[in-house]
Amino acid sequence: MSRTPPEPAGPSGDRRPVGGPENLAADPTPKTPFDALTEPEPPDLVGRPAPDVGVEEYVRQIKETADKLVRDKAGRGDIKLLATALRELRYCFKVFAGYRGRRKATVFGSARTRPDHPAYKAAEEFGRRMAEVGWMVITGAGHGIMEAGHVGAGRDNSFGLNILLPFEQSANTVVHGDPKLMTLRYFFTRKLMFIKESDAVVLFPGGFGTHDEAYEALTLVQTGKSHLFPVVMVDEPGGTYWATWLRFVEDELLARGYISPADRALFRVTDSVEQAVEEVTGFYRVYHSMRYVRGHLLLRLRARLSEPLLARIERSFADILSGGHFEQVGALPEEANEPTLANLPRLKFRFDRHAAGRLRQLIDLINQEG
């Protein structure tokens, strides 16, 4: 039976990923965009001090839940599934933890795309351009588009999330043997890591798996179950793959009312690598990250907004408020576990979580005018 590969040992005997920082602070841990997004507090906690739940308490809950499996006489298969998933996730968390300070783009696309295909060359160019501006590239570690993204980014800037399949899928030569290659048994743990660790999702032409990842990313963003990030569909130059998909979305989903007009802002379609890079990097020009605190959404920004722009936002985006007004503030006490972001200004407001597309439009305005 294939197993998760052993972790490289550090100098003290503790096993850690090679290539990351020698010492990672135990508390606070580096954050991912996904970590900072939490559900609003339950109604019975509104206005009351938030419970102080530390790492040790969450570990205790994991152990208690594991003990209950025995008490419940859960089946061996169910327990094996949970044990494997937990082991895989723990290992992935450890590998990624050493690189939390760098932005990452997840690249999806067909494993069948040959190196001489224009889509392969476009994915390779995208990986190269992202590495040049300091980003890292995550892929499924296979061949085709996945390999192309890694070839462009280079081994040092590449993560691989390989999947064990009934038919063998070997890792591409760029990440094979690299400590940033993780091999997972379950799609659901793999899919979680693709989104959790990403600051952007970029999709080149592919099959069922590519569309699965596209719709999952869009669904998670649309429903507020993930942080907001750019989703970009990239055709080869002059290609029609995603342009045809876009016509279906507009002629069927949008026309039938299955998505709202504002949802169209949650993704971009282009046949230009340059435009794809600009779409990804431009999303973080002024906007930095988001976090919910005590029922308020905080947009952390790289620069304070001008008063005229704030007034324009108040006029143009009142529909996304569930109450109150837009307010510029500093870091809140509840954000003390993210000290590296303490100096960033915040736009604070109560957000109607049905309006993800409009929130994206707000962030676009801030990036364009801020």
Image (spheres, rainbow, N blue to C red):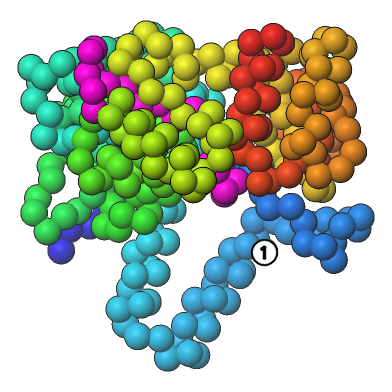
The image shows residue 232 at horizontal and vertical percentages of 40, 26
What kind of residue is marked 1?
Glu
Q: Label 1 neighbourhood size at 10 Å, few (<14), some (14-19), many (20+)?
A: few
Q: Is residue 251 left or right of residue 125?
A: right
The image shows residue 144 at horizontal and vertical percentages of 15, 30
Magenta-drawn stretch contains 198: no
Q: Quadrant of residue 162?
A: top left
Q: Quadrant where the C terminus lies?
A: top right
Residue at x 13%, y 45% (from the top left corner): 169
Q: Quadrant where the N terminus lies?
A: bottom left
The residues colored magenta run 221-241
Q: Would you say the magenta stretch is mainly helix, strand or loop?
A: loop
Residue at x 85%, y 29% (from the top left corner): 326
The image shows residue 119 at horizontal and vertical percentages of 19, 20
Q: Quadrant of residue 275?
A: top left
Q: Is residue 82 left or right of residue 221?
A: left
Residue at x 69%, y 9% (from the top left corner): 369
The front one of 52 and 132 is 132
The front one of 59 and 199 is 199
Residue at x 50%, y 90% (from the top left corner): 71
Q: Is residue 176 left or right of residue 370?
A: left
Local SS, label 1: helix
Q: Is residue 225 left or right of residue 181?
A: right
**Number of numbered discs:** 1
Residue assigned mark 1: 57
